[in-house]
Image (cartoon, rainbow, N blue to C red):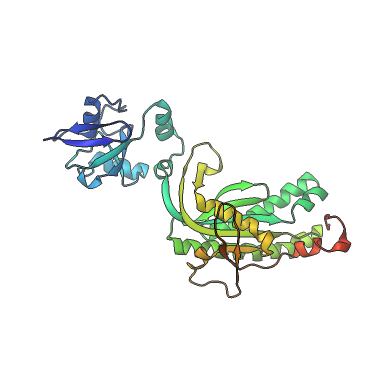
Amino acid sequence: MPFQVDFKGEKIVPVAEGQSILEASLAAGIPHYHACGGKGQCTTCRVLVQEGEEHLSELTSFEKTIKAVRKFPDNIRLACQAQVTGEGVKVHRLIKDDTDRYIFINSAEENSTEVMGVRRKLALFFIDIRNFTPFIEAHPPFDVIHIMRRIFTLLRNAIEQYGGRIIDTAGDGLYAVFGLESKIKKAAEAAVLAGLKIMEDVKIFNNTYMRPYFNHFFEVGIGVHVGSVIYGNVGIGLNNNLTVMGYPVNIAARLQAATKELNNSFVISERAFSLLKNPPYVTSSANINLKGVSSAFEVRLIGKPFQYMATFSKPEQGPVGNSG
């Protein structure tokens, strides 16, 4: 009696003993890509196994070789090689047309895991440079870009030192994640250590460079949260193509924005804070209202009050302007 394989969104097809998934799908009329003719060489017949992985045959030598070279996730099989040994197998045919084929096969910098998309718990890190607009308004383009490059190099060095990866930049801020190669507790710890280092490095940069040469100083606002998100390579040629998506990302961004309201340079969610093995000694807590969150959101304040807010809030000072 043949087994059955459920092709997601297509049909359920019978698979006879000794028949490959590819042979069964073609026999059932599914236009399954197989550029090499089912010889285990092109990978265009690859499928994502959603259920019943234990009811498939062992990896063939072709699959082992391709898995090592392409860094396939464990739940990716070649339909031309895999045979069904039991019921309950559900697969998703990945390459359905020529556009899919280009995305999965012809991409010049393909990382198969990232192209497939991964759900993972990450530490999400948003940072914004404060007191930068007055500098932009008072200095020529060369100085603005030069200083921006200096600051972003400082941020990148700290983030990468602790195993983080920058996902995107926007104006005078950026967004990074920690935990792509580590567990969530270590990721949260790394995000905090990177943030603390950045605050110290910015302080040194102000004292040794900005104040002496420009009579100006910068500060940063940092928001950190943790949660389960989806990351993957969207293949548009920007920022290494990696995108991270999910509700926790929005929370982290809003925590960074809340640093102004709370007048504290580093705001971390209580959830992330609870994961820290060695939390900062000086902390205070607060409950804040965040857009899209029905109840008050508990956070820890592990930074310092902003100097520029105190400076520019003095009534006798008049309109905000550049100090240098």
Image position, residue 159 (x, y; %): 56, 57
Image position, residue 168 (x, y; %): 58, 47
On the picture, is 287 further left or further right than 227? right
Q: Please, is residue 26 above or below residue 179 in the view?
A: above
Image position, residue 79 (x, y; %): 26, 35
Residue at 72%, 49% in the rendered image? 146
Image label count? 0
Q: Name the one closer to the observer, 229 or 291.
A: 291
> What is the quadrant of the N terminus in the image?
top left
On the picture, is 256 further left or further right than 249? right
Q: Would you identify the image quadrant in which residue 184 lies?
A: bottom left
Q: Residue most toward the front? A: 294
Image position, residue 157 (x, y; %): 59, 57
Q: Name the one closer to the observer, 209 or 25.
A: 25
- Asked whether residue 246 appears in the rendered view, the answer is yes
Q: Would you identify the image quadrant in which residue 103 lies?
A: top left
Q: Name the one closer to the observer, 228 or 232.
A: 228
On the picture, is 272 further left or further right than 100? right
Q: Residue most toward the left? A: 1
On the picture, is 295 further left or further right than 183? right
> What is the quadrant of the C terminus in the image?
bottom right
